[in-house]
Amino acid sequence: MAIEDNPESRTRYGEELRAKREAAGFTQEELSQRAVMSRTHIAHIEAGRRRPDVADARRLDGVLGTGGFFERFLPTLDGRRVAEHFAEALEFEGQATVIRVYGPKLVPGILQTEAYAREVLSSGHPPRSDEERDELLSTRLQRARVLDKFSSPVVWALLDEDVLRRPVGGPAVMCEQLRHIATLGECRRIRLHVLPFEVGTHALLEGVVSLMWFEELPPIAYVEALNTGRVWELPSVVRECQVAFDHALGDALSHRKSLALIKSVAEDYEHEAQ
C-alpha cells in the first residue's frame, strides 16, 4: 500500500499542537527548547506544512503532558493506513477519556494481539499485499497503546461469545489473544463483559458500536458494517446507541464471570494447540 499524506489531518494536527502549546503557556521557542526541536520545525508542524515523526510526537507528548495524544494521532496523517470510513473514528479514539466498545464477531481492534490482528487483516476482499497488510497492522497495534496508561481512557469491552469461539488464526493464536484480554481484565485496565449464546437476541446484535466520551467535547457514537462506518455526533442518535449498549450490557455476564469464561475457553484452545 502506498502511503498517501493527508493534508487535512496535518492541518488538524497542527491546530491541536498550537492549542495545547498555548494552553501550557509556551511560545514556540520555549517549546522548541524543552522538546529539543527547532522552532522552525514546530512552526511548520503547526502550520500543517510538515509531518512530525514518532520521535517528534513523543517529545511533544512528554513536554506538554498530553498522555500520548500526539503519537496516537500520527496514523491519521496517512490517509491509507486505515480504512477510509474509520479515519475520523481513529482520531476521536485518541482523544477519548471513556471508550465503550462492542465486538459481535471479532475482538475489537484496541484489544487485538499482533498475531490475531495479522490474521484478520490477511482476510477480506479484495486481497491485500503483505505490504498493505503490514501498514494496517502497524496502525492497529499503535491504536492498542491507548491501554498503556492505567487510568485513561476508561475502557469497557462488551464481547459476544461468538468472539471467543471463532478460531481466528487457529487455537494457538486464540489462546494468546484470550489470555491477553483476560490479563487486561484482571489488572483492571479494562472492564469486561461477555454476552453468552444463551441470551439469544439482544439490542446490539446487528452491528459494531463504539461509544466515546471526552473532556471538552460531547460524546459520539461510531457504528460500523461491512466496508462502511459512520461517526454520529447528533445527540439523539448517540443517546439511542448508548441505550442499546446499556440494554445489551444488562444481558451480559458480570466482569468476574466473563473473565472465568474467557480463561476457560483459552485453556481449551491451549489443549487443542498441544
Image (cartoon, helix red, strand yellow):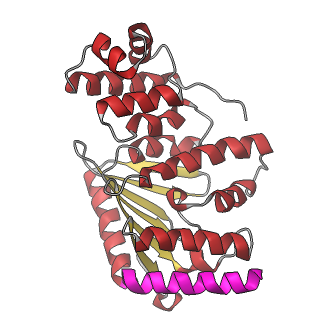
Number of numbered discs on residues: 0
Q: Residue 169's image quarter?
A: bottom right
**Would residue 3 be seen by someone viewing this image from the given angle?**
yes
Q: Which residue is at a point 66% across and 76% down the rendered structure image?
A: 166
Residue 269: x %, y % from top left: 68, 82
Q: Nearer the viewer, residue 257 or 58?
A: 58
Left or right of 9 in this view: 39 = left
Q: Is residue 23 above or below residue 29?
A: below
Q: Quadrant of the C terminus?
A: bottom right
Q: Which residue is at a point 35% across and 43% down the rendered structure image?
A: 95
Residues drawn in magenta: 251-274
Q: Which residue is at a point 44% across and 82% down the rendered structure image?
A: 258
Q: Which residue is at a point 26% across and 52% down the rendered structure image?
A: 235
Q: Residue furthest bottom?
A: 198
Residue 33: x %, y % from top left: 34, 15
Q: Is residue 95 above or below residue 212?
A: above
Q: Residue 48's image quarter?
A: top left
Q: Residue furthest top?
A: 40
